[in-house]
Image (cartoon, helix red, strand yellow):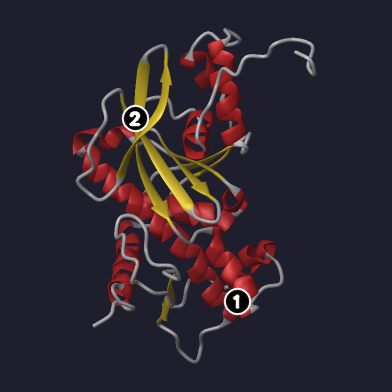
Amino acid sequence: PRWLGAVIPRTGIAGDQQAATFGNACLAPGLAKNTYGTGCFLLMNTGPTPMASQHRLLTTVGWQRAGHAAYLLEGSVFMGGATVQWLRDGLGLIASAGEVEALAASVPDNGGVYLVPAHTGLGAPYWDPFARGTLFGLTRGTTRAHIARAALEAIAFQSAEVLQAMEKDIGSDTRSGLSELRVDGGAARNDLLMQFQADLLGVPVVRPAVTETTALGAAWLAGLAVGFWRDEAELAALWRAERRFEPAMADDRRAELFAGWRRAVARTLGWAKPD
């Protein structure tokens, strides 16, 4: 009161990814969001009962209000936007992170090149600290554009594998509930990456009008506590999409790309493990 003139209650406290999930209005079981930051953090609402993952994901509390909790499944990707930073700072292929989209879009596909950005090991669902980053499929025709495209695709491949693990955990009977993936974070502004993510998943990727979802989620929780908003249904109605990326890739092409990715990942596992 001495400084602000009144006692101001603190009515909402939330961790970064929990707040972002709430701010992306993933308020019902089956709704999921992915934050594309330095790493990627994919969380799915699984409802009022904690679910023990059978596919190497984490179970976490999402939020608790009025004595009722919502639980989430969570998977982390270590190298998300950090992959683009490495292209800039480590290889010097680009002068700024914003250049990567145009460079990657200058070629029609990855030219058979796969980058597995296991620079610090692989996160979910592998959890292999001994994996190391690798580039596969290089030929005399490979250009820096192919490497840039492979880097963006690697972010999407890693995220897709986390979501596939989540789908296995929640069961095929709830597959229809996964109608879209909501996204935020700096790399979510990359349209090429978002389109490729939608193509890999086979469901729309939706970028919200408000991308600062961590701050929004914390504000929503505080506002609910003081009665500024009535309930979560009112919040869900407030959430707006800025753009939807609809999947446009043929199933056989998706399967071909995933097969190449998994072959590449298999060769990185345990690389740095002592004999």
Q: Is residue 41 left or right of residue 45?
A: right
Q: Nearer the viewer, residue 212 or 100?
A: 212
Give the residue number, with chain letter if any, for mark 2.
71
- x 55%, y 52%: residue: 37
**Is residue 76 in view from this perspective?**
yes
- x 44%, y 64%: residue: 154
What amino acid is labelled 1 in the image?
Gly
Q: Nearer the viewer, residue 179 or 63?
A: 63
Neighbourhood count class around disc 2 (C-alpha, 10 Å): few under 14, some 14–19, many 20 upward: many
State the image quarter where residue 4 is shown.
top right
Which quadrant is home to the N terminus? Answer: top right
What amino acid is labelled 2 in the image?
Tyr
Q: How many marks?
A: 2
Give the residue number, with chain letter if any, for mark 1.
90
1 or 2: tag closer to the N-terminus: 2
Q: Dot 2: what SS?
A: strand
Residue 143 image position (x, y, % from top left): 56, 83
- x 51%, y 30%: residue: 14
- Numbered mark located on residue 109 in the image: none
Q: Is residue 239 above or below residue 105?
A: above
Q: Is residue 47 above or below residue 153?
A: above
State the image quarter where residue 23 is shown.
top right
Q: Dot 1: what SS?
A: helix
Q: Is residue 240 above or below residue 79?
A: above
